[in-house]
Amino acid sequence: MKGTFKLFLKANERVFINGAVLRADRKVGIELLNDVDFLLENHVLQVEDADTPLKQLYFIIQIMLMSPSEKPAAAKLYKDSVKALLATFDSAEVLNGLKQIDVMIAEERTFEALKALRALFEVEAGILARKRGESLGCDNPAQEDRHAAAG
């Protein structure tokens, strides 16, 4: 994140800033005056929720932000994952998004990269739903639902 930024935290809410974990004991506003990487608690993805390719990439980037000591290993994993995802997806929206995210990561704009990646989750969900439907021989999600109910 570049420049000043205001965060508003609720009581007992956590924020991750440059690898440190801060918890507010009451409702508070914090102004970040310099360049920092941060992640709000409600944007933290738990490992068990990283159940799609893009969510797994998000989790890797999140590790880079939250655990500076693990950043070199996570950065290598990130590069390998992006390369594989660019070769796998055929959606122009996802491919363009991944390329933009890769630029953001190269420019150390981690917060913005995570935000852009979250925006692709819905697109990915649609792609995966269509793929599941195709594998079941269904033309649309409604047919998939009927097929699942009958099975």
Image (spheres, helix red, strand yellow):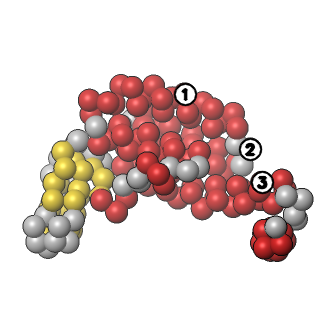
Say whether residue 61 is visible: yes
Q: Quick one: label 3 or label 1, which is nearer the N terminus?
A: 1
Residue position marked by numbered label 3 in the rendering: 131
Name the kind of residue labelled 2 in the image.
Answer: Asp
Contact? badges 3 and 1 (CB < 8 Å): no
Cα separation, mark 3 vs mark 2, equals 12 Å
Question: CA separation, marks 2 and 1?
Answer: 18 Å
Question: Of the residues tagged 3 and 1, which is closer to the observer?
Answer: 3
Extreme residue toward the left, this view:
25
Of the image marks 3 and 2, the number of the one nearer the N terminus: 2
Figure check: 135 above or below 53: below
Q: Quadrant of residue 61?
A: top left
Task: Report the front residue among 146 and 102.
Answer: 146
In the rendered image, which quarter is residue 122 located in?
Answer: bottom right
Instruction: Give the image location of residue 55, x and y in percent.
Output: 52, 49
**Quarter of the picture holding the C terminus:** bottom right
In the image, 64 versus 115, the foreground residue is 64
Real-space CA distance between mark 3 and mark 1, rounded to the nearest whole angstrom: 24 Å
Is residue 73 positioned above or below 136 on the image? above
Residue 97, x across and y down, in percent = 58, 47
Check disc 2 and report the residue beneath it: 90
Mark nearer the viewer, 3 or 2: 3
What residue sits 36% from the left and 49% below the top? 111
Q: Which mark is residue 119?
A: none
Q: Is 97 on the left-hand or right-hand side of 37?
A: right
What's the residue type where badge 3 is placed? Lys
For the residue marked with disc 1, what is the amino acid? Asp
Residue identifier under label 1: 80
The structure residue drawn at horizontal position 70% and vertical position 48%, both measured from the top left corner, is 92
Q: Is residue 140 visible?
A: no
